Amino acid sequence: MSAYDRIRRLLDGDDTVVLDGGVGSELVRRGVRWRGHGLRTDPEAVRSLHGEYVAAGADVIRTRRRPDLAGNGQQRQGGPGRTRGARGAGLHCWVGLVCDESGRLFTGETMADAERGLAPLEPDVVLVNCIPPDDATAGLRELLAVRGGPCGVYPHAGRFDPPEWHFTDEYPPQTLADQARHWADMGAWVIGGCCGTTPEHIAAFSRTLRVS
Ligand SMILES: [Zn+2]
C-alpha cells in the first residue's frame, strides 16, 4: 500500500485527516532564521520539527521539497500552472485558498468561482488556510456548499506583523482543537494548522478528532 493509499482511505472513511502545523513560524520561534533559508543552514531543526509533527499525530506533512513544476518560474506558488504541472507529473494535488471573513477570496471571487476555476484540474482536496479561525469557519462553510469532494482547513494562530509572526495566546492547543472539532462536525475532511500553530496544537487535534 502506498503512503497515499492510506490518506485516500482516511478521506473515504469517517476519520479526519490531520495535517501538520506551522513550520516557518515555529522554526523562527526556535531561533532558526527562516529568511536565511533554514533548509540549508539548519536542516536538522527542519527535520526534527517534521518528526515532531508526525509524532504528534499528523497524517500529512507539508515540505518545501518538490519537483520544479513551474517550468520557467513565472507561475505564482499555488497557481493553476503549478497544479497542472503536478498533475502532469502524476502527483496528488491539494490546493489551499486564502479567504476573508465573508468566505471570499482576497481577490474578490466567491468559493463557487474558485471551485469552477479549479474543477478542470481535479484537485484531490481544496482547503482554506493561513487565516484566523473565524474566517476559516466562513471559508469552509462556503467551500462545503459548492464542492462535493474533500475540503479542509488549516488556520493560523496569532498574526503577521511584518517582518515577523507574532504569537498570541488566544488559541492555545485545546481551544483550537475544540474549534477543529466544530470544523470536523461541519464536514471538513482534512484539518491542520498554519502559521503560529505548533506540534502541541497538532497533538491536541489528533486526540480530539480521532474516532478510531
Ligand atoms: Zn500560514
Image: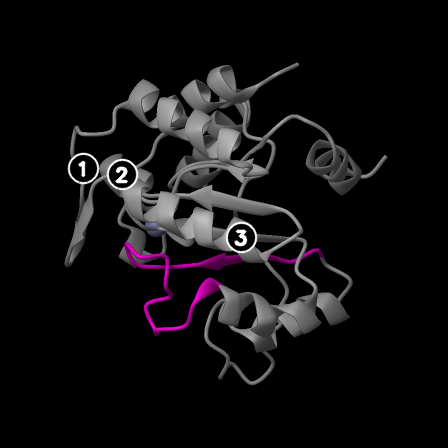
Q: Secondary structure at mark 1?
A: loop
The C terminus, quarter of image: top right
Q: Which residue is mark 3?
A: 145
Q: CA distance from mark 2 to mark 1?
A: 7 Å
Q: Earlier in the sequence, mark 3 or mark 1?
A: 3
Residue 6, image x, y percentages: 75, 33
Q: Is residue 107 magenta?
A: yes
SS state under label 2: loop
Residue extent of the magenta highlight: 92-111
Residue bearing the label numbered 2:
157
Magenta part, dominant SS: loop
Q: Which residue, given by chain and number where applicable, does mark 1 sit on?
A: 167
Label 1 near label 2: C-beta < 8 Å? yes
Rounded to the nearest angstrom, the CA distance separating label 3 from label 1 is: 32 Å
| Label 1 Cα neighbours within 10 Å, binned few <14 / some 14-19 / many ≥20 | some
Q: Amino acid at mark 1?
A: Phe
